[in-house]
Image (cartoon, coloured by chain):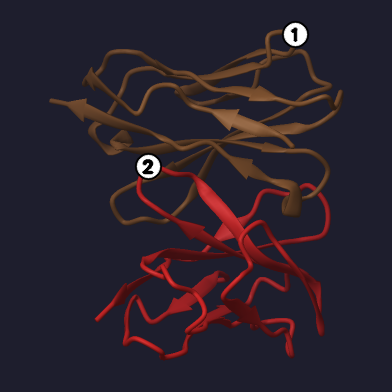
Amino acid sequence: DGGITQSPKYLFRKEGQNVTLSCEQNLNHDAMYWYRQDPGQGLRLIYYSQIVNDFQKGDIAEGYSVSREKKESFPLTVTSAQKNPTAFYLCASDREGNQPQHFGDGTRLSIL
Amino acid sequence: AQTVTQSQPEMSVQEAETVTLSCTYDTSESNYYLFWYKQPPSRQMILVIRQEAYKQQNATENRFSVNFQKAAKSFSLKISDSQLGDTAMYFCAFMKHKMSDMRFGAGTRLTVKP
C-alpha cells in the first residue's frame, strides 16, 4: 500500500545535538511538507518542497534544515539552534495543486 | 495573513447524538478551500471533509456534513449519530491556492461518551 513513513516514532535529543527525522513516501507525490504540532496549537509549517533539489521556508523555519535529493525522501534536521524542539512533527505530501495532503504517523521529539 | 479560529477547545457528546464543531476564518480571498481533519489518539491526520468556496452546496460525507457560510466566514462541522471512534482532535484548515498556504486552527478535542 502507498503511504508516508516517518521514523523514528520517538526521538530524544541532547543539548547541542542535531537530530534528523526521516520521511519517505511511495505515493509518487511531487510536494512534501514538514509541520510542527504543539499542545493547544494547530499545525505550523516548517519547510516544504515542491520539486527535487528545491525547498522553501515555511512559517517557523528557524533552527531547522531540510534536503530533497530524491522525490521520495524529505528529511528534517532539528539543529542545536532550535531552542525549543520538543514537539510532535508531521510529514505530509500531495500532488501538485489543491489535492488534500496525506500525512505520516509523526515523530515525537523530546529533550533529554 | 489568513487565520483560522476554533473557539471550542473541548466538546463532548453522547454516543448516537449529533454535535457541531465551530470554525471561523479570516480572508480577503474570494476563492479558497476549507477542510476538516481528524486526529485520533494514534496522532495520524485524517481528512474528514473538504469544501470549495465557489460551491454553494454544503459538502457531505456520510455522517459528516458542513455548514459553510461564506459571508460570515464560518465553516462548522456536524457529526451525526456520533460513534465512539469519532473521539479525536478535529482541526479546521484553510487553503488559499496551494498546500503551502494551508493554515490550521488550534483544534477541538471531541469526546464521544458511551
Q: Nearer the viewer, residue B81 or B53?
A: B53
Check residue B71 in the rendering and tell me which mark sits there, or answer none. Answer: 1
Q: Could you tell me residue B19's position as x and y percent?
A: 36, 15
- Can residue B24 be seen here? yes
Q: Could you tell me residue A60's position as x and y percent?
A: 61, 61
Locate residue B21 relative to residue A39 in the image: left or right: right
Spatial CA span between label 2 and label 1: 28 Å
Q: Nearer the viewer, residue B40 or B107?
A: B107
Q: Quadrant of residue A55?
A: bottom right
Locate residue B90 relative to residue B65 in the image: left or right: left
Residue in view at x 28 percent, y 38 percent: B85
Same chain for labels 2 and 1? Say yes or no.
no
Chain for colour red: A
Tell which residue pokes out farthest to the left in this image. B114
Q: Which residue is mark 2?
A: A40
Q: Could you tell me residue A78's position as x and y percent?
A: 50, 80
Locate residue A96 relative to residue A84 in the image: left or right: right
Q: Secondary structure at mark 2?
A: loop
Q: Residue flagged by tag 2: what amino acid is it?
A: Gly
Q: Could you tell me residue B8's position as x and y percent?
A: 38, 22
Residue in view at x 74 percent, y 37 percent: B1
Q: Nearer the viewer, residue B60 or A51?
A: A51
Number of callouts in the render? 2
How many neighbours does mark 2 have within 10 angstroms: few (below 14), some (14-19), or many (20 or more)?
few
Residue in view at x 85 percent, y 27 percent: B29
Query: Which color was chain B given?
Result: brown
